[in-house]
Amino acid sequence: MTKMTVNGVSTTTTPGQEQYEYFPAGFGRKRRMWCQYDYRDMDGELFSCVRATLEECRKERDAWLQKRGQGCQTPSTRI
């Protein structure tokens, strides 16, 4: 597992890089696992979100890229 932040600063520095980690939140029976997700786009801008699953995080990232007019320029879809 990677450490996504050092002193509150993201360690996702390479364009096209994504990092994620799951963490528990809540207490008792309401305790759930959440996914923290960071993605650095090709322009160097950082996208970060917290959702229940990695798939939800990637959907948010794709919507963010579409909104910015970049399409899906992820490491897995670049040619």
Image (spheres, rainbow, N blue to C red):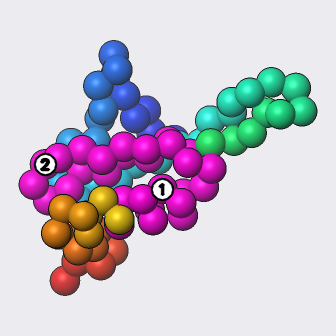
The answer to whether 53 appears left or right of 60 in the picture is right
Q: Badge 2: few (under 14), some or many (20 or more) residues near its Cα, within 10 Å?
A: some
Q: Quadrant of residue 26?
A: top right
Q: Which residues are magenta?
A: 35-62
Residue at screen point 29% across, 78% down: 77
**Magenta span contains residue 57:** yes
Indicate the secondary structure of the residue bearing disc 2.
loop
**Magenta span contains residue 46:** yes
Q: Amino acid at mark 1?
A: Cys
The answer to whether 39 appears left or right of 22 in the picture is left
Residue 57 is marked as 1
Residue at screen point 30% across, 32% down: 10
Nearest the camera: 78 or 27?
A: 27
Identify residue for label 2.
Answer: 44
Indicate the secondary structure of the residue bearing disc 1.
helix
The answer to whether 52 appears left or right of 69 in the picture is right
Residue 64: percent from left, percent from top: 30, 59
42 vs 69: above or below: above
Q: Quadrant of the C terminus?
A: bottom left
Residue at screen point 28% across, 42% down: 12
Residue 48 seen from this side:
yes
